[in-house]
Amino acid sequence: MAQYELLLPKMGESVAEATVIKWEKNPGDTIEVDDTILEIATDKVDSEVPSPVSGKMVKHLFNENDVAQVGDVIAIIEIEGDTAVEEEVKDAEISTLKREEEIPFVPETINEKEELAAVDFSSSDRFYSPLVKSIAQEEGIDVQELDLIKGSGTDGRVTKNDLLDYISERGKDKVEAKNEPINEESKQVQPQQSNPKAQEIKSEPSKAVKPATSVSGGDEIIEMDRMRKLIADHMVNSVQTSPHVTSFVEADVTNLVNWRNKVKNSFEKREGEKITFTPIFIEAVAKAIKDLPMINISVKGTQIIKKKDINIGMAAALPSGNLIVPVIKNADQLNLLGITKSVNDLASRARLNKLQPDEVQGGTFTLTNVGTFGNVMGTPIINQPQVAILAVGAIKKKPAVIETEYGDVIAIRHMMYLSLSYDHRVVDGSLGGSFVRRVADYLEQWDSNREI
Protein backbone atom coordinates (compact mmCIF):
# COMPACT_ATOMS: atom_id res chain seq x y z
CA MET A 1 0.00 0.00 0.00
CA ALA A 2 1.22 3.51 -0.81
CA GLN A 3 0.44 6.73 0.94
CA TYR A 4 -0.66 9.95 -0.76
CA GLU A 5 0.10 13.43 0.61
CA LEU A 6 -2.94 15.69 0.25
CA LEU A 7 -1.83 19.30 -0.22
CA LEU A 8 -3.84 22.45 0.48
CA PRO A 9 -4.63 23.52 -3.10
CA LYS A 10 -4.03 26.95 -4.62
CA MET A 11 -7.26 28.94 -4.30
CA GLY A 12 -6.48 32.12 -6.19
CA GLU A 13 -3.64 34.47 -6.93
CA SER A 14 -3.93 36.46 -3.71
CA VAL A 15 -4.93 33.62 -1.37
CA ALA A 16 -1.99 32.27 0.62
CA GLU A 17 -3.67 30.49 3.52
CA ALA A 18 -6.94 29.00 4.70
CA THR A 19 -8.49 27.90 7.97
CA VAL A 20 -9.66 24.31 8.42
CA ILE A 21 -13.35 24.56 9.30
CA LYS A 22 -14.47 20.93 9.35
CA TRP A 23 -13.06 17.52 8.43
CA GLU A 24 -15.61 15.52 6.44
CA LYS A 25 -13.39 12.42 6.32
CA ASN A 26 -11.79 11.06 9.49
CA PRO A 27 -8.99 8.49 9.95
CA GLY A 28 -10.26 5.10 8.85
CA ASP A 29 -12.93 6.46 6.49
CA THR A 30 -13.05 5.18 2.91
CA ILE A 31 -12.56 7.87 0.26
CA GLU A 32 -13.60 7.98 -3.39
CA VAL A 33 -12.33 10.35 -6.05
CA ASP A 34 -13.96 13.81 -5.73
CA ASP A 35 -15.30 13.06 -2.24
CA THR A 36 -15.18 16.15 -0.04
CA ILE A 37 -12.28 15.76 2.40
CA LEU A 38 -12.68 18.97 4.40
CA GLU A 39 -14.20 22.43 4.42
CA ILE A 40 -11.90 25.44 4.49
CA ALA A 41 -12.41 29.18 4.87
CA THR A 42 -10.45 32.08 3.42
CA ASP A 43 -10.96 35.80 3.96
CA LYS A 44 -13.56 35.86 1.18
CA VAL A 45 -15.37 32.57 0.86
CA ASP A 46 -15.83 29.08 2.28
CA SER A 47 -15.11 26.13 0.01
CA GLU A 48 -14.61 22.37 -0.04
CA VAL A 49 -11.45 20.42 -0.85
CA PRO A 50 -12.18 17.28 -2.93
CA SER A 51 -10.02 14.17 -2.96
CA PRO A 52 -7.98 13.57 -6.14
CA VAL A 53 -7.56 9.88 -5.25
CA SER A 54 -9.44 6.89 -3.85
CA GLY A 55 -8.30 5.20 -0.68
CA LYS A 56 -8.54 5.42 3.10
CA MET A 57 -7.89 8.38 5.37
CA VAL A 58 -4.82 7.72 7.51
CA LYS A 59 -4.10 10.94 9.35
CA HIS A 60 -5.05 14.61 9.68
CA LEU A 61 -2.04 16.91 9.89
CA PHE A 62 -4.11 19.98 10.81
CA ASN A 63 -6.87 20.29 13.38
CA GLU A 64 -10.10 22.21 12.95
CA ASN A 65 -9.55 26.00 13.25
CA ASP A 66 -5.86 25.61 12.36
CA VAL A 67 -4.50 27.88 9.61
CA ALA A 68 -2.68 26.09 6.76
CA GLN A 69 -0.60 27.64 4.01
CA VAL A 70 -1.16 26.85 0.34
CA GLY A 71 1.01 23.82 -0.49
CA ASP A 72 1.06 22.42 3.06
CA VAL A 73 0.47 18.69 3.46
CA ILE A 74 -2.84 18.60 5.32
CA ALA A 75 -3.63 14.87 5.35
CA ILE A 76 -2.28 11.41 4.51
CA ILE A 77 -4.41 9.05 2.41
CA GLU A 78 -3.62 5.37 1.94
CA ILE A 79 -4.05 4.33 -1.70
CA GLU A 80 -3.73 1.12 -3.68
CA GLY A 81 -0.17 0.33 -4.80
CA ASP A 82 2.97 -1.60 -3.90
CA THR A 83 5.34 1.34 -3.40
CA ALA A 84 6.51 1.81 0.15
CA VAL A 85 6.70 5.49 0.93
CA GLU A 86 6.87 5.48 4.72
CA GLU A 87 9.97 7.66 4.68
CA GLU A 88 8.29 10.17 2.34
CA VAL A 89 5.29 10.35 4.64
CA LYS A 90 7.56 10.89 7.60
CA ASP A 91 9.35 13.69 5.74
CA ALA A 92 5.98 15.25 4.87
CA GLU A 93 4.93 15.19 8.51
CA ILE A 94 8.22 16.77 9.53
CA SER A 95 7.85 19.47 6.87
CA THR A 96 4.23 20.18 7.87
CA LEU A 97 5.00 20.39 11.55
CA LYS A 98 8.17 22.42 11.07
CA ARG A 99 6.69 25.38 12.92
CA GLU A 100 6.45 23.31 16.08
CA GLU A 101 10.09 22.24 15.83
CA GLU A 102 11.22 25.85 15.41
CA ILE A 103 9.91 26.83 18.86
CA PRO A 104 13.06 27.56 20.88
CA PHE A 105 14.06 25.31 23.79
CA VAL A 106 12.54 26.43 27.07
CA PRO A 107 14.04 25.37 30.40
CA GLU A 108 11.92 23.09 32.54
CA THR A 109 11.91 25.65 35.32
CA ILE A 110 9.30 27.73 33.51
CA ASN A 111 7.14 24.93 32.15
CA GLU A 112 4.68 25.48 34.95
CA LYS A 113 4.45 29.17 34.06
CA GLU A 114 3.74 28.31 30.42
CA GLU A 115 0.95 26.00 31.44
CA LEU A 116 -0.61 28.75 33.51
CA ALA A 117 -0.33 31.16 30.56
CA ALA A 118 -1.94 28.78 28.08
CA VAL A 119 -4.45 30.58 25.88
CA ASP A 120 -7.61 29.02 24.45
CA PHE A 121 -7.94 30.68 21.04
CA SER A 122 -11.10 28.75 20.18
CA SER A 123 -13.19 31.35 21.99
CA SER A 124 -12.26 34.01 19.41
CA ASP A 125 -13.78 34.35 15.95
CA ARG A 126 -10.81 36.31 14.58
CA PHE A 127 -8.12 34.57 12.56
CA TYR A 128 -4.64 34.47 14.12
CA SER A 129 -1.59 32.92 12.51
CA PRO A 130 0.35 30.24 14.43
CA LEU A 131 3.20 32.72 14.94
CA VAL A 132 0.89 35.36 16.45
CA LYS A 133 -0.64 32.71 18.73
CA SER A 134 2.81 31.57 19.83
CA ILE A 135 3.95 35.13 20.67
CA ALA A 136 0.71 35.84 22.54
CA GLN A 137 1.15 32.61 24.48
CA GLU A 138 4.70 33.51 25.50
CA GLU A 139 3.72 37.05 26.52
CA GLY A 140 0.69 35.93 28.52
CA ILE A 141 -1.77 37.82 26.32
CA ASP A 142 -5.24 36.29 26.59
CA VAL A 143 -7.85 36.17 23.84
CA GLN A 144 -9.83 39.14 25.18
CA GLU A 145 -6.73 41.34 25.08
CA LEU A 146 -5.67 40.02 21.68
CA ASP A 147 -9.10 40.77 20.19
CA LEU A 148 -8.66 44.44 21.13
CA ILE A 149 -5.50 44.87 19.05
CA LYS A 150 -6.09 46.68 15.77
CA GLY A 151 -4.62 44.70 12.89
CA SER A 152 -2.98 46.09 9.76
CA GLY A 153 -3.19 42.86 7.76
CA THR A 154 -5.81 41.72 5.27
CA ASP A 155 -9.34 42.39 6.58
CA GLY A 156 -7.88 43.71 9.84
CA ARG A 157 -5.86 40.64 10.76
CA VAL A 158 -3.28 41.03 13.51
CA THR A 159 0.22 40.56 12.09
CA LYS A 160 3.43 39.75 13.94
CA ASN A 161 4.52 43.40 13.77
CA ASP A 162 1.15 44.60 15.14
CA LEU A 163 1.52 42.30 18.12
CA LEU A 164 5.17 43.20 18.73
CA ASP A 165 4.34 46.92 18.57
CA TYR A 166 1.53 46.39 21.04
CA ILE A 167 3.81 44.46 23.40
CA SER A 168 6.42 47.21 23.14
CA GLU A 169 3.91 49.92 24.03
CA ARG A 170 2.50 47.83 26.84
CA GLY A 171 6.01 47.41 28.22
CA LYS A 172 6.58 51.18 28.14
CA ASP A 173 3.35 51.76 30.04
CA LYS A 174 4.42 49.33 32.74
CA VAL A 175 7.84 50.98 33.08
CA GLU A 176 6.30 54.45 33.33
CA ALA A 177 3.86 53.28 35.95
CA LYS A 178 6.66 51.66 37.93
CA ASN A 179 8.89 54.76 37.80
CA GLU A 180 6.12 57.21 38.68
CA PRO A 181 6.71 58.88 42.10
CA ILE A 182 4.36 57.58 44.73
CA ASN A 183 2.71 60.11 46.99
CA GLU A 184 2.27 58.71 50.49
CA GLU A 185 -1.22 60.14 50.65
CA SER A 186 -2.09 58.42 47.37
CA LYS A 187 -1.50 55.08 49.06
CA GLN A 188 -4.70 55.59 50.99
CA VAL A 189 -7.49 53.50 49.57
CA GLN A 190 -10.30 55.59 48.12
CA PRO A 191 -13.03 54.40 50.53
CA GLN A 192 -10.89 55.60 53.50
CA GLN A 193 -11.04 59.24 52.38
CA SER A 194 -12.73 61.59 54.77
CA ASN A 195 -15.01 62.95 52.08
CA PRO A 196 -18.43 61.44 52.92
CA LYS A 197 -19.64 62.12 49.39
CA ALA A 198 -16.83 59.99 48.00
CA GLN A 199 -17.74 57.21 50.42
CA GLU A 200 -21.37 57.44 49.35
CA ILE A 201 -20.41 57.16 45.68
CA LYS A 202 -18.09 54.24 46.35
CA SER A 203 -20.65 52.35 48.38
CA GLU A 204 -23.19 52.36 45.54
CA PRO A 205 -22.78 50.21 42.43
CA SER A 206 -22.01 52.38 39.41
CA LYS A 207 -24.95 52.43 37.03
CA ALA A 208 -22.67 53.42 34.14
CA VAL A 209 -20.78 50.15 34.19
CA LYS A 210 -23.68 47.79 34.81
CA PRO A 211 -24.36 45.54 31.85
CA ALA A 212 -27.62 46.06 30.02
CA THR A 213 -30.31 43.58 30.93
CA SER A 214 -33.52 42.56 29.24
CA VAL A 215 -36.60 43.74 31.11
CA SER A 216 -39.07 41.58 29.25
CA GLY A 217 -36.83 38.54 28.94
CA GLY A 218 -38.06 38.00 25.38
CA ASP A 219 -35.04 39.39 23.57
CA GLU A 220 -32.90 36.98 21.59
CA ILE A 221 -29.13 37.36 21.37
CA ILE A 222 -27.73 36.17 18.02
CA GLU A 223 -24.00 35.86 17.56
CA MET A 224 -22.72 37.03 14.18
CA ASP A 225 -21.38 34.25 11.98
CA ARG A 226 -17.90 34.50 10.43
CA MET A 227 -19.08 35.97 7.14
CA ARG A 228 -21.28 38.58 8.79
CA LYS A 229 -18.32 39.74 10.89
CA LEU A 230 -16.19 40.08 7.76
CA ILE A 231 -18.96 42.06 6.04
CA ALA A 232 -19.35 44.32 9.06
CA ASP A 233 -15.62 45.05 9.22
CA HIS A 234 -15.51 45.65 5.46
CA MET A 235 -18.42 48.10 5.54
CA VAL A 236 -17.04 50.08 8.50
CA ASN A 237 -13.62 50.25 6.84
CA SER A 238 -15.15 51.52 3.60
CA VAL A 239 -17.07 54.34 5.28
CA GLN A 240 -13.98 55.34 7.27
CA THR A 241 -11.82 55.28 4.13
CA SER A 242 -13.95 56.97 1.46
CA PRO A 243 -16.10 60.11 1.62
CA HIS A 244 -19.27 58.79 -0.03
CA VAL A 245 -21.35 60.85 -2.46
CA THR A 246 -24.37 59.48 -4.35
CA SER A 247 -25.83 60.67 -7.66
CA PHE A 248 -29.26 59.57 -8.95
CA VAL A 249 -30.75 59.21 -12.43
CA GLU A 250 -34.20 58.02 -13.53
CA ALA A 251 -34.23 55.98 -16.71
CA ASP A 252 -37.02 54.99 -19.09
CA VAL A 253 -36.34 51.31 -19.82
CA THR A 254 -39.60 50.53 -21.64
CA ASN A 255 -37.86 49.34 -24.82
CA LEU A 256 -35.56 47.11 -22.77
CA VAL A 257 -38.43 45.54 -20.80
CA ASN A 258 -40.46 44.89 -23.97
CA TRP A 259 -37.43 43.34 -25.69
CA ARG A 260 -36.76 40.98 -22.79
CA ASN A 261 -40.41 39.93 -22.63
CA LYS A 262 -40.21 39.14 -26.33
CA VAL A 263 -37.03 37.00 -26.24
CA LYS A 264 -37.00 35.40 -22.77
CA ASN A 265 -39.07 32.30 -23.65
CA SER A 266 -37.16 31.47 -26.83
CA PHE A 267 -33.86 32.14 -25.07
CA GLU A 268 -34.72 29.74 -22.24
CA LYS A 269 -35.76 27.01 -24.68
CA ARG A 270 -32.56 27.42 -26.70
CA GLU A 271 -30.01 27.89 -23.89
CA GLY A 272 -31.71 26.02 -21.05
CA GLU A 273 -31.47 29.02 -18.71
CA LYS A 274 -33.16 32.36 -18.13
CA ILE A 275 -32.06 35.80 -19.19
CA THR A 276 -32.49 38.35 -16.40
CA PHE A 277 -31.90 42.09 -16.33
CA THR A 278 -28.58 41.72 -14.46
CA PRO A 279 -26.41 40.80 -17.49
CA ILE A 280 -28.00 43.67 -19.43
CA PHE A 281 -27.07 46.09 -16.64
CA ILE A 282 -23.53 44.68 -16.52
CA GLU A 283 -23.11 45.16 -20.28
CA ALA A 284 -24.23 48.80 -19.98
CA VAL A 285 -21.82 49.37 -17.07
CA ALA A 286 -18.91 47.87 -19.03
CA LYS A 287 -19.66 50.13 -22.00
CA ALA A 288 -19.86 53.20 -19.76
CA ILE A 289 -16.51 52.31 -18.14
CA LYS A 290 -14.94 52.12 -21.61
CA ASP A 291 -16.24 55.64 -22.24
CA LEU A 292 -15.25 57.01 -18.81
CA PRO A 293 -12.29 54.86 -17.62
CA MET A 294 -11.42 57.06 -14.62
CA ILE A 295 -14.31 55.45 -12.75
CA ASN A 296 -12.43 52.12 -13.02
CA ILE A 297 -9.64 52.98 -10.58
CA SER A 298 -8.39 52.41 -7.05
CA VAL A 299 -6.44 54.56 -4.60
CA LYS A 300 -3.17 53.72 -2.88
CA GLY A 301 -2.01 56.54 -0.68
CA THR A 302 -1.69 59.54 -2.99
CA GLN A 303 -1.53 57.35 -6.10
CA ILE A 304 -4.43 56.65 -8.45
CA ILE A 305 -4.24 53.20 -10.03
CA LYS A 306 -6.07 53.08 -13.36
CA LYS A 307 -7.24 49.51 -14.00
CA LYS A 308 -6.66 47.89 -17.37
CA ASP A 309 -9.23 45.13 -16.86
CA ILE A 310 -12.94 45.75 -16.42
CA ASN A 311 -14.03 43.22 -13.79
CA ILE A 312 -17.63 43.74 -12.67
CA GLY A 313 -18.68 42.40 -9.28
CA MET A 314 -22.35 41.62 -8.73
CA ALA A 315 -23.73 41.56 -5.20
CA ALA A 316 -25.62 38.30 -4.59
CA ALA A 317 -27.74 37.37 -1.58
CA LEU A 318 -27.01 34.04 0.10
CA PRO A 319 -29.61 31.79 1.76
CA SER A 320 -28.08 32.75 5.12
CA GLY A 321 -28.99 36.39 4.49
CA ASN A 322 -25.37 37.42 3.97
CA LEU A 323 -24.04 38.97 0.76
CA ILE A 324 -21.22 37.87 -1.49
CA VAL A 325 -19.82 39.55 -4.60
CA PRO A 326 -18.73 37.17 -7.39
CA VAL A 327 -16.83 38.87 -10.19
CA ILE A 328 -17.35 38.80 -13.98
CA LYS A 329 -13.77 39.04 -15.24
CA ASN A 330 -13.13 41.09 -18.41
CA ALA A 331 -16.83 41.86 -18.79
CA ASP A 332 -16.13 44.25 -21.68
CA GLN A 333 -14.77 41.36 -23.75
CA LEU A 334 -17.93 39.25 -23.43
CA ASN A 335 -21.06 39.53 -25.53
CA LEU A 336 -24.48 39.56 -23.88
CA LEU A 337 -24.80 35.78 -24.16
CA GLY A 338 -21.43 35.27 -22.50
CA ILE A 339 -22.28 37.68 -19.68
CA THR A 340 -25.62 35.93 -19.16
CA LYS A 341 -23.93 32.53 -18.90
CA SER A 342 -21.38 33.88 -16.41
CA VAL A 343 -24.02 35.65 -14.29
CA ASN A 344 -26.24 32.57 -14.05
CA ASP A 345 -23.33 30.27 -13.26
CA LEU A 346 -21.87 32.47 -10.52
CA ALA A 347 -25.27 33.23 -8.98
CA SER A 348 -26.19 29.53 -8.91
CA ARG A 349 -22.92 28.45 -7.31
CA ALA A 350 -23.06 31.35 -4.85
CA ARG A 351 -26.38 30.03 -3.52
CA LEU A 352 -24.83 26.58 -3.14
CA ASN A 353 -21.67 27.94 -1.47
CA LYS A 354 -19.57 26.51 -4.32
CA LEU A 355 -17.65 29.63 -5.34
CA GLN A 356 -13.87 29.51 -5.49
CA PRO A 357 -11.89 32.23 -3.65
CA ASP A 358 -10.52 33.61 -6.92
CA GLU A 359 -14.07 34.17 -8.20
CA VAL A 360 -14.83 36.79 -5.53
CA GLN A 361 -11.59 38.76 -5.95
CA GLY A 362 -10.17 41.20 -8.45
CA GLY A 363 -13.30 43.29 -9.00
CA THR A 364 -12.82 46.85 -10.27
CA PHE A 365 -16.47 48.01 -10.10
CA THR A 366 -19.57 46.63 -8.36
CA LEU A 367 -23.25 46.45 -9.33
CA THR A 368 -25.98 45.76 -6.79
CA ASN A 369 -29.63 45.23 -7.71
CA VAL A 370 -31.73 46.57 -4.85
CA GLY A 371 -34.80 46.20 -7.06
CA THR A 372 -34.89 42.48 -6.30
CA PHE A 373 -36.10 43.43 -2.80
CA GLY A 374 -38.76 45.81 -4.15
CA ASN A 375 -36.67 48.92 -3.42
CA VAL A 376 -36.83 51.77 -5.91
CA MET A 377 -33.39 53.15 -5.05
CA GLY A 378 -30.49 52.80 -2.62
CA THR A 379 -27.24 54.40 -1.48
CA PRO A 380 -24.80 51.48 -1.47
CA ILE A 381 -21.44 51.44 0.31
CA ILE A 382 -18.34 51.22 -1.88
CA ASN A 383 -16.63 47.84 -2.11
CA GLN A 384 -13.04 48.75 -1.22
CA PRO A 385 -10.54 49.27 -2.80
CA GLN A 386 -12.89 50.27 -5.65
CA VAL A 387 -14.11 53.85 -5.93
CA ALA A 388 -17.71 53.42 -7.13
CA ILE A 389 -20.72 51.12 -6.85
CA LEU A 390 -23.96 51.29 -8.85
CA ALA A 391 -27.37 50.36 -7.43
CA VAL A 392 -30.31 49.67 -9.76
CA GLY A 393 -33.83 49.90 -8.37
CA ALA A 394 -37.08 48.16 -9.13
CA ILE A 395 -38.65 48.77 -12.54
CA LYS A 396 -42.06 50.38 -12.05
CA LYS A 397 -44.80 51.44 -14.43
CA LYS A 398 -45.31 55.19 -14.12
CA PRO A 399 -46.91 58.01 -16.10
CA ALA A 400 -44.19 59.93 -17.92
CA VAL A 401 -44.00 62.80 -20.36
CA ILE A 402 -42.82 61.76 -23.85
CA GLU A 403 -41.70 64.27 -26.45
CA THR A 404 -42.97 63.50 -29.94
CA GLU A 405 -42.94 65.37 -33.26
CA TYR A 406 -46.60 66.16 -32.64
CA GLY A 407 -46.04 67.51 -29.13
CA ASP A 408 -45.65 66.19 -25.59
CA VAL A 409 -47.86 63.31 -24.41
CA ILE A 410 -48.27 61.42 -21.16
CA ALA A 411 -47.90 57.66 -21.37
CA ILE A 412 -47.38 54.67 -19.09
CA ARG A 413 -43.67 53.79 -19.15
CA HIS A 414 -41.34 51.38 -17.38
CA MET A 415 -39.14 53.58 -15.20
CA MET A 416 -36.27 52.82 -12.84
CA TYR A 417 -33.76 54.71 -10.69
CA LEU A 418 -30.01 54.23 -10.85
CA SER A 419 -27.85 55.48 -7.97
CA LEU A 420 -24.06 55.68 -8.03
CA SER A 421 -22.08 55.98 -4.79
CA TYR A 422 -18.51 57.13 -5.39
CA ASP A 423 -15.33 58.07 -3.55
CA HIS A 424 -15.25 61.86 -3.55
CA ARG A 425 -11.49 61.89 -2.93
CA VAL A 426 -10.90 60.98 -6.56
CA VAL A 427 -14.29 61.02 -8.30
CA ASP A 428 -15.88 64.46 -8.63
CA GLY A 429 -19.56 65.11 -9.15
CA SER A 430 -19.02 65.76 -12.83
CA LEU A 431 -17.51 62.32 -13.46
CA GLY A 432 -19.87 60.50 -11.10
CA GLY A 433 -22.97 62.15 -12.52
CA SER A 434 -21.81 61.69 -16.11
CA PHE A 435 -21.11 58.01 -15.55
CA VAL A 436 -24.50 57.09 -14.10
CA ARG A 437 -26.16 59.16 -16.86
CA ARG A 438 -24.14 57.26 -19.47
CA VAL A 439 -25.30 53.91 -18.09
CA ALA A 440 -28.91 55.14 -18.19
CA ASP A 441 -28.45 56.27 -21.79
CA TYR A 442 -27.31 52.81 -22.88
CA LEU A 443 -30.38 51.28 -21.21
CA GLU A 444 -32.80 53.83 -22.65
CA GLN A 445 -31.39 53.47 -26.17
CA TRP A 446 -31.86 49.71 -26.24
CA ASP A 447 -32.41 48.22 -29.69
CA SER A 448 -35.83 46.52 -29.67
CA ASN A 449 -34.76 44.34 -32.64
CA ARG A 450 -31.51 43.10 -31.12
CA GLU A 451 -30.65 39.43 -31.59
CA ILE A 452 -29.07 37.29 -28.86
Image (cartoon, helix red, strand yellow):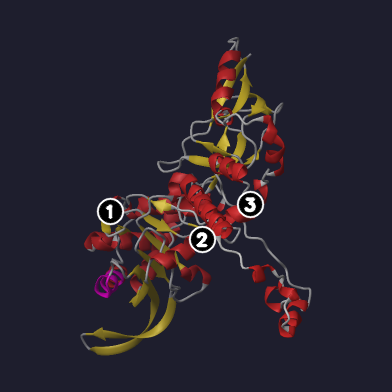
Identify which amino acid the numbered label 2 is placed on: Asp
Q: Residue furthest front?
A: 184
Q: Does residue 318 appear in this view?
A: no
- Magenta stretch in the rendered image: 428-436
Residue labelled with disc 2? 233
Query: Mark 3: few, some, or many residues within 10 Å (few <14, many ≥20)?
Result: some
Residue labelled with disc 1? 307
Q: Is the residue 164 above or below the residue 318 in the image?
A: above
Q: Are marks 2 and 1 in contact (CB under 8 Å)?
A: no
> Who comes first in sequence, dot 1 or dot 3?
3
Identify which amino acid the numbered label 1 is placed on: Lys
| Magenta span main SS | helix
**Residue at the spot x=55%, y=31% of the render?**
99
Mark 2 and mark 1: span between their CA atoms?
25 Å
* Residue 32 part of the magenta-drawn span: no
Quadrant of residue 320 within the rendered picture: bottom right
Q: Is the residue 288 above or below the residue 95 in the image?
A: below
Q: What is the secondary structure assignment of the residue under circle 2?
A: helix
Q: Is the residue 281 above or below the residue 407 in the image?
A: above
How far across and how far down the image is residue 191, in percent? 74, 75
Q: Does residue 339 appear in this view?
A: yes
Q: Looking at the image, which is closer to me, 34 or 244? A: 244
Q: Looking at the image, which is closer to me, 214 or 3? A: 214
| In the image: residue 63, left or right of residue 298 | right
